[in-house]
């Protein structure tokens, strides 16, 4: 009997994947566990394994095709067997889905219930959010008691609106005179998920920002001494990562995540820090586990290894999940300061600027100094201003007295 091979769900946030390449030809014999194709997910390029023995009867998806989870990509079976029954089954399923989509856009949008006065039932917070973001409550369906529209319905609508905005933007009509040309680039799965996650973060988490200018003179000296003694090259980012872990353990109110659906804030007794790494078509955040328990040498080696695998798109999904805090460094690009969008479900993210040579006043005299700006973005639902300020002050103290990181 022919067997369908579907697009698997390979990461927790994956909604679709791009079939990058086939590794097996039609007609080839396959054993369970064999890698038959490679798929680009929102986080990495990953191998697709066969779950059954058989012959690859039909490669349904082509290289470069973008497919939703559960879509048919191939058919397995016995040699000489027909794939037509499986193909027909999935074709019927697609037709049914298309009919449902047509019905949903033909004026049959669910109508939210109305009160006795004819007004749409919605919570006060939902009404305010709808006004702020230009949403029509009459076009939304509620998930609250008796169909009332509540906050999560507005948040879901904002995400859908951002997706549709990207999807329906018309091509820009540039003049095609001389060398005035433009290129249309497919939005990768990674870029699409980045857009969705960060839009949701920015819309739902009320951000506020705190900035401090750190005296890095002693940190510069300490790094030079450490690198002169060992084979592992320690970066300034490694020092900030270690200092962040120490400050997080001392201030667990920042080392937390907000969970409205549970009515809880989770505070963590460990520091799993995600480090933002730029790759060709997006940004990934591999996670260093238990940073508070590791020395600078181990942090440096692990960070470098994770960054190399991130750029090679070979990180495992579990290496990019479960962080309690995130850092993002643009200092190597000469950025003096910037603010970052919080990486859900974290309650804060640290933006790291470049180390600057500046004149400073010390004991009444102007002398050369080294400064670095750190900007903390906080989710005000979980972190208050004073709480974030105390954390940032502790982080500053560790960097200005780097010997505390060796204790």
Image: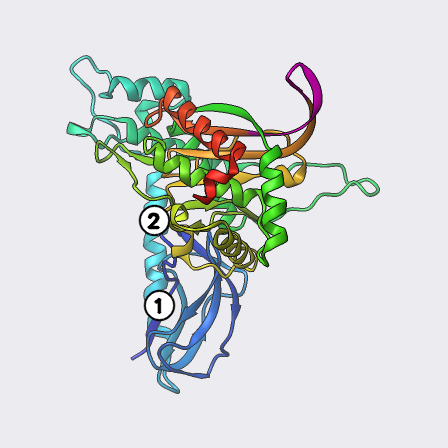
Q: Quadrant of residue 330?
A: top right
Question: Which residue appears farthest toward the right when viewing the image?
Answer: 178
In the image, 233 versus 385, the foreground residue is: 233
Callout 2 secondary element: helix
Callout 1 secondary element: helix
Residue 88 is tagged as 1
Residue 343 within the magenta-colored segment of the rendering: no
Characterize the magenta stretch by its predominant secondary structure. Answer: strand
At 34% from the left and 49% from the top, the residue drawn is 99
Identify the magenta region.
Answer: 360-373
Residue to which mark 2 is pinned: 99
Q: Quick check: 112 above or below 343?
A: above
Q: Quadrant of residue 266?
A: top left
Q: Could you tell me how far apart the alpha carbons at marks 1 and 2 are, in whole angstroms?
A: 17 Å
Q: Residues within 10 Å of mark 2 (few under 14, many from 20)?
A: few
Q: Where is residue 21 drawn, in percent x and y?
A: 53, 68
In the image, 80 versus 166, the foreground residue is: 166
Q: Where is residue 217 drawn, in percent x and y?
A: 62, 33
């Amino acid at each position: 009997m022919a067997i369908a091979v579907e697009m698997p769900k390979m990461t927790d946030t994956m909604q679709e994947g791009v079939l990058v390449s086939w590794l097996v030809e039609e007609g080839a014999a396959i054993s369970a566990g064999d890698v038959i194709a490679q798929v680009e997910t929102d986080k990495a390029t990953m191998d697709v394994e066969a779950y059954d023995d058989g012959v690859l009867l039909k490669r349904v998806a082509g290289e470069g095709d973008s497919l939703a989870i559960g879509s048919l990509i191939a058919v397995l079976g016995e040699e000489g067997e027909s794939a037509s029954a499986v193909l027909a089954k999935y074709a019927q399923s697609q037709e049914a889905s298309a009919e449902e989509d047509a019905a949903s856009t033909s004026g049959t949008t669910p109508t939210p219930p109305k009160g006795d006065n004819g007004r749409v039932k919605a919570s006060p917070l939902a009404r305010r959010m709808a006004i702020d973001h230009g949403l029509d409550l009459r076009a939304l369906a509620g998930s609250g008691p008796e169909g009332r529209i509540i906050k999560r319905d507005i948040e879901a609508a904002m995400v859908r609106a951002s997706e549709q905005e990207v999807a329906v933007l018309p091509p820009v009509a540039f003049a095609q005179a001389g060398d005035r040309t433009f290129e249309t680039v497919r939005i990768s799965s990674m870029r699409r998920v980045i857009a969705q996650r960060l839009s949701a973060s920015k819309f739902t988490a009320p951000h506020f920002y705190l900035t401090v200018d750190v005296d890095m003179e002693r940190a510069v000296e300490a790094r030079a001494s450490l690198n002169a003694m060992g084979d592992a090259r320690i970066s300034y980012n490694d020092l900030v990562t270690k200092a962040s872990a120490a400050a997080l353990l001392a201030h667990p109110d920042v080392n937390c995540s907000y969970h409205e659906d549970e009515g809880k804030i989770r505070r963590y007794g460990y520091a799993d820090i995600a480090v933002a790494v730029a790759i060709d078509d997006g940004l990934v955040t591999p996670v260093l586990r238990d940073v508070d328990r590791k020395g600078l040498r181990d942090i440096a080696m692990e960070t470098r290894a994770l960054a190399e695998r991130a750029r090679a798109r070979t990180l495992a999904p579990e290496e990019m999940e479960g962080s309690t805090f995130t850092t993002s460094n643009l200092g190597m690009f000469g950025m003096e300061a910037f603010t970052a969008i919080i990486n859900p479900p974290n309650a804060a993210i640290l933006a790291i600027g470049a180390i600057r040579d500046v004149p400073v006043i010390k004991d009444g005299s102007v002398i050369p100094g080294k400064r670095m700006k750190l900007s903390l973005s906080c989710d005000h639902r979980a972190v208050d201003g004073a709480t974030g300020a105390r954390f940032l002050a502790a982080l500053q103290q560790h960097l200005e007295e780097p010997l505390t990181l060796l204790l």
